[in-house]
Image (tube, rainbow, N blue to C red):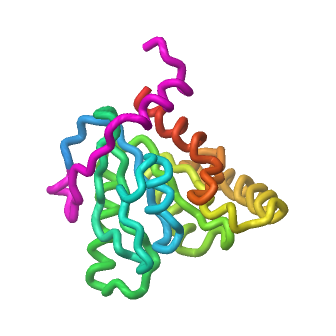
Amino acid sequence: MDQNLEDFARWLFTQECVFIRGAESTASLPDPIFPEIAFVGRSNVGKSSLINAVLGRRALARVSHTPGRTQQLNFFLLGKRMYVVDMPGYGYAAVSKTKLKLFSQLILDYLKGRVPLKRVFLLIDSRHGLKPPDLSVMETLDKAAISYQLILTKTDKCSPAHLELLSASLTETLKTHPAAFPVLLSTSSVDKSGIEQVRETIAAFAF
């Protein structure tokens, strides 16, 4: 391919992106024929808004005022080149304990057994930084030796000084997590800052 990564990313995110299926068990996962990246985060972190911004769609991933609405693994096929996976949010107490246990097991089974999964993007609300549930997910990903990368969301709501301190702190924290990719991404789905960098990072796995 003669395109460089920047050109390829620009091309990829102008291609069709279609919803393939929502998987509620590992038996209903799509065939593992494309590279995959997945987004995960706390239920109120702005995951659906970020996915829509990255994919350039207004309502591909469902945006809800009620946290915890994503209750399955939602697979989107981007440009017939890769799957983008919207994972259930975690840390939302209003979901029943039985359902929460099933979601948690589904996430773990998917993470540990999905060969084409290239990277998990763990979303962190820049206003609040890492919370105990985030650290728990990081430890799980470390133990499973699954590459993951932190993406800060809602940076438009924070001052530059706050973001600078938070980024420095998180960069140090990442050094103690063996499966964490060391580069932190900062984004806003409102002013679209950082979106192109996320796109290039994702496109590299299909390049």
- Identity of the residue furthest to the top in this view: 2
Q: Is 3 colored magenta in this rendering?
A: yes
Quarter holding residue 94: bottom left
The residues colored magenta run 1-29
Above or below, 21 relative to 132: above
Can residue 82 be seen here? The reply is no
Q: Is residue 207 left or right of residue 171?
A: left
Quadrant where the N terminus sits is top left
Quarter holding residue 157: bottom right
Quarter holding residue 169: bottom right
> Which residue does the image show at 60% across and 51% down from the upper left?
192
- Identity of the residue furthest to the left in this view: 27
> Which residue does the image show at 60% across and 61% down from the upper left?
153
Q: Position of residue 207 (x, y in %)?
A: 44, 26
> Which residue does the image show at 35% across and 56% down from the upper left?
60
Q: Is residue 167 left or right of residue 52?
A: right
Q: Is 175 colored magenta in this rendering?
A: no
Looking at the picture, tell me which residue is in the foreground, 29 or 5.
5
Q: Position of residue 80 (x, y in %)?
A: 28, 34
> Which residue does the image show at 29% across and 52% down from the upper left?
75
Above or below, 171 relative to 97: above
Can residue 61 be seen here? The reply is yes
Q: Position of residue 45 (x, y in %)?
A: 53, 69
Looking at the picture, tell me which residue is in the foreground, 137 or 88.
88
Looking at the picture, tell me which residue is in the foreground, 133 or 166.
166
